[in-house]
Amino acid sequence: MTTSNKKLLSASTLLTAVALIVLPLLAQQFGNAWVRILDIALLYVLLALGLNVVVGFAGLLDLGYVAFYAVGAYLFALLASPHLTESFPAIQALFPHGLHMPVWLIIPAAAALAGLAGVLLGAPTLKLRGDYLAIVTLGFGEIIRVFMNNLDAPVNITNGPKGIAQIDAFSIFGLNFMKPHELFGFEIANVSNYYYLFLVLVVGSIFLCRRLERSRIGRAWMAIREDEIAAKAMGINTRNLKLLAFGMGATFGGVSGAMFASFQGFVSPESFSLQESVMIIAMVVVGGIGHIPGVVAGAVLLAALPEVLRYVAGPLQAMTDGRLDAAILRQLLIALSMILVMLLRPRGLWPAPEHGGKSVAKRVDPEPTATPVRATAEAVQ
């Protein structure tokens, strides 16, 4: 990279950072609802990045990813709300003022528990591929949702379909994110506080995913994605790497779920339906499987689009004299938008360069005597 290109990249990075910092301050001038849309979009970016590790890097089709989202959310809800102390007298005796664990303890616990759930899911599915793997992961996601929906008897742990409320807001170093604050004369609303928290998590996740992608583990995942048999023949431990992909991707879901519970202040099984899993995997596919910038773009688009289309469905409903339901119109517009994107960009909005077809220049092998087996081994190592 030349000096001019480095300067251009640095300038564009700086401008992007400034725009992302100023964005919620501008959006909150038009109402907190717009900042809330940005918050939800960033949460979905976290989920899409985690699923991209499983689907994009390792090539494992996971339709039950929302289960890890639910695990993280419910763990935060149980450890940062009065629900357990109200349901169990023994816990109330130990914590008379309520069970309100600090976030620095809950967040790692949510990531670890979700990662363990990912390994437990991956262990019995190691020999499955394609449609069979998708069906098993789909069943796992539904089992977790039904489990959360019915675990209110005989012992009330999840409070069943009524959900868990009164969840503590995110608080660190005495800074409560649910309360507005003032900085340099600017009032930062509570939704803007969460925006900056989620933005930091997204930036950290992108950095981690980039390092994973360029590491030996990332190259091994991609070798498994392209041809598992060839990867195994080259000495790659496909079993352990698949389990690692499931566990690593699940940790992103666990942290996202904990942030969701803190942000909403309420969790219920309805928030973790099959539609959520389908939407998350659609973000990865529409954006560009395996390409981090594309996944981020797809997540932002599909997360913000339903909320923005609320303002379009209303006038369309009025044009039909109320004969069409606004929610149905909104879902129709979302589906048409996704179909249009996939027709015009079948590889995604921002596909990976190596899968971009015409954008990839043909490379000449400097060693004509190198065999395909040798080239594969060098790529993995």
Image (cartoon, rainbow, N blue to C red):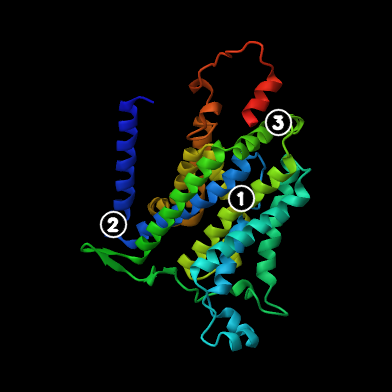
In this rendering, which labeled residue sits more in front, label 3 or label 1?
A: 1
In this rendering, which labeled residue sits more in front, label 2 or label 1?
A: 1
Q: Position of residue 76 (x, y in %)?
A: 55, 68
Could you give the CA–CA distance between mark 2 and mark 3, rounded to whole angstroms?
A: 48 Å
What residue does disc 2 label? Answer: 25
What residue does disc 3 label? Answer: 227
Figure quadrant of residue 24: bottom left
What residue does disc 1 label? Answer: 248
Lower position in the chain sequence, tag 2 or tag 1: 2
Q: Position of residue 160 (x, y in %)?
A: 64, 73
Quadrant location of the N terminus? top left
Lower position in the chain sequence, tag 2 or tag 3: 2
Quadrant location of the C terminus? top right
How packed mark 3 is, by other alpha carbons closer than 10 Å (few <14, some 14-19, many 20 or more), is: few
SS class, disc 2: helix
Lower position in the chain sequence, tag 3 or tag 1: 3
Q: Is residue 139 visible?
A: no
